[in-house]
Amino acid sequence: MRSKLLLFLTILFMGYFQAFGQVDSGGTYPKDFFTETDSVKPDFLQLLYPHQEVEDTAYCTLSVYLPNKFEERYVRIYLECDRKPDHVPPVLVIDGREMKCTSRTSSLTVQNGVKTNRYGYWYYFEPVDNGSFICRTRNLTFNQVSYDDKLLFSVTSLPEGGQHLSAVNLILVMAICFGSGYLILWLRYHREADEGLAAFVLRTQRLPLSVSWASTHFMVPLLLFGVAACLILSPFLTNLREARFAILDYRMGAILFLLALGLFLYFIQNCKLRFREVSTTLNDDEIFEAFKSVGQKYQWTIDHAGMDCLVAHTNRRFWTPTWGEQIFLVFDQGRFWINSVNDLTERSCLFSYGRTERNICLVIEAIREKEGHLK
């Protein structure tokens, strides 16, 4: 009697454990069906269910493993199913960014005569900074039945401030950005210096620039564009796997401000190159005499006195707010063209504090005065 009772209890418990390991059509999963390959418990786990009733439910789970070391930045995402999806590899989307599968695994286990397939897909995601994220499956179907779902997870273990450029990457970013800026200047201005000053001014009414002069004159806008380019390019060097455009995160405001300010200053600096047309009744020699008298009075240095143009520069003193100015005058029939800019052979200076306009007015006044004497 005792042996029969023991046999009955054994059969009963065996049937109970078999029933515990089964799953019904409603989608109840076995307790330990999904186990991570390295026996590390996931930080976030989501079971995926079919969107319609099916007789044969696919077992599928989405797991998130946060960085387990302070210096690690990658979040591991693992999708595991008991059968192969209709579309391989499955597509995951995190906050609008599509994640590509980096590796896949498959295995077949047999236990108590029951075969179990396991298909695993690994994805790596590197967040820019701490925060909450939503991972979604896209077009995950089994036999045309959708299992799409989402998993909300948060990252709090990253260092404050997000990703940081290494010294090598920082040098590389700066070299690319500012080197590209200098190349653009070279392509734009390297031929202007080959043409004579007078011929160029009469044709364009603008001061011709060499590459050196252009880099001095446009130094501030160039720096602003370079910094904006560094902010845009830096994510591609800190995270080549999942490059994220800087305009999509907190740097958007800084980039737009730098670009807008750079464009504004470029427009202002470009306008300063325009020559002013002044009509006169004096001939070229008389214009030169008036120009020379102003230079002697204000201690200008005449750099060039030719048949077609005059070039001079002021001598900087300790109390002057700029590095000096240059004065350009081009002869024309019944008129002349004049301009004054901050000295392009010195350091870059964004403001002239009215000194360039003063130089132009001094020359025009001297010529008008000479015209009055000759009447």
Image: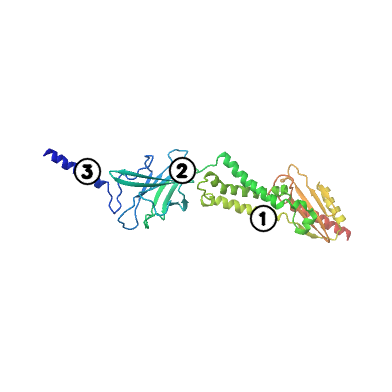
Q: Earlier in the sequence, mark 1 or mark 3?
A: 3
Going 77% across and 56% down the picture, which residue do you hit? 201
Query: x, y percentage for residue 294?
Result: 82, 51
Residue at the disc numbered 3: 14
> Please, what is the three-letter code of the amino acid marked with disc 1?
Phe
* Residue at numbered disc 1: 267
| Residue at x 33%, y 44% (from the top left corner) | 109
- Tell me, yes or no, whether the two marked residues, 2 and 1, touch with CB atoms within 8 Å: no
Residue 313 in picture, x, y percent from top left = 78, 47
Q: Nearer the viewer, mark 1 or mark 3?
A: 3
Residue depicted at x 12% and y 38%: 2
Q: Name the secondary structure under disc 3.
A: helix
Position of 68 relative to 91 (above/below): above
Q: Secondary structure at mark 1?
A: helix
Pick whichever, 126 or 61, lies toward us.
61
Sequence-wise, the earlier of marks 2 and 1 is 2
- Which residue is identified by label 2? 74
Please state which amino acid type lies under the numbered disc 2. Tyr
Instruction: Say which label, 2 or 3, has the lower sequence index.
Output: 3
How packed mark 3 is, by other alpha carbons closer than 10 Å (few <14, some 14-19, many 20 or more), is: few
Disc 2 to disc 3, C-alpha distance? 44 Å
